[in-house]
Amino acid sequence: MKILISNDDGYQAPGIVALHEAIQDLGDVEVVAPEHNNSAKSNALTLHSPLYVHQAANGFRYVNGTPADCVHVALTGLLGYRPDLVVSGINNGANMGDDTIYSGTVGAAMEGYLFGIPAIAFSQTQKGWAHLDAAARKARELVRRVLAGPITWDAPWLLNVNIPNLPEGDLKPFRICRLGRRHAAEKVISQTSPHGETMYWIGGAGPAKDSAEGTDFHATAQGHISITPLKVDLTDHDGLSMWAGVAAWPASGEAGG
Ligand code: MN
């Protein structure tokens, strides 16, 4: 089993160090991760500046790019082989509901998935790394489950996992969930620069809007580890017929129809 590890908090983040430590004996494990914090970079690729890869003393390789850059470069030339699994994290903070659209942690895993490789994104639900040791042991447990469990490896799959910051004994079992929803983000923060210009800082993520039973928000609030299988097709399947009607609507006589 060949496993590629990445993240979005950077190769020196406690979460990726703990994840590597926890799963390094489960196969041939390599780390390719961003040099700096790239949280909320989603699947962004760097197209207009060169990427450099360096190796740290602990063997981790780091890239002056995004999480998706790291996995993309690893899979398209750097590794020289195709990993069986891409694992991302453990992220410093939750990636639940609509967070998954913005998350670089999910983006790194999704890049593997888009290349046809099964992938898992791990996040702790609170920032600050409390009980990271417990989260890493649970990440290891899930990787072992997918390696041994009754799942297909013929087609790629993508799991989004959120682990409450609790001691191992207080963590409740894995629970399969759908994504919840958040409110719109909090207000932008404005300040005045030393030059008298207005500066804006993106505000925090909003609170949960849909945290009903069955969601990742609900499960993690109860102490469970949420697992959401994700797919990438953004098509609004329910809307196809309505839009087909618009496309077929008789032309109104405007030039060009
Ligand atoms: Mn992050």
Image (cartoon, rainbow, N blue to C red):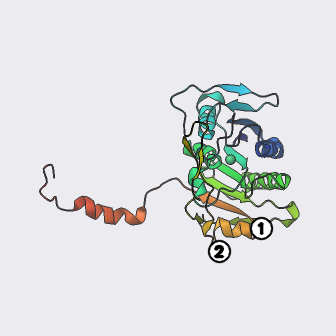
Percent x, y of residue 255: 12, 50
What secondary structure is found at the residue carrying circle 2? loop
Instruction: Specify the amino acid type for callout 1.
Output: Gly
Q: Find residue 64 and report its image quarter.
A: top right
Percent x, y of residue 100: 59, 54
Q: Find residue 93 and report its image quarter.
A: bottom right
Q: Which residue is mark 2?
A: 213
Q: Which residue is mark 1?
A: 223
Percent x, y of residue 103: 61, 50
Q: Is residue 50 above or below residue 7?
A: above
Residue lying at 55% horizontally and 61% vertically, measured from the top left: 184
Earlier-in-chain disc, 1 versus 2: 2
Q: Find residue 159 and report its image quarter.
A: bottom right
Residue lying at 77% horizontally and 46% vertically, measured from the top left: 15
Q: Is residue 171 above or below residue 53?
A: below
With 210 as the anchor, is 5 left or right in this view? right
Q: Quadrant of the N terminus?
A: top right
Percent x, y of residue 165: 79, 59
Observer-nearest of 106 and 35: 35
Instruction: Specify the amino acid type for callout 2.
Output: Glu
Q: Is residue 199 above or below residue 254?
A: above
Observer-nearest of 166 and 203: 203
Q: Is residue 155 visible?
A: no
Residue closest to the far bottom: 213
Observer-nearest of 209 and 1: 209
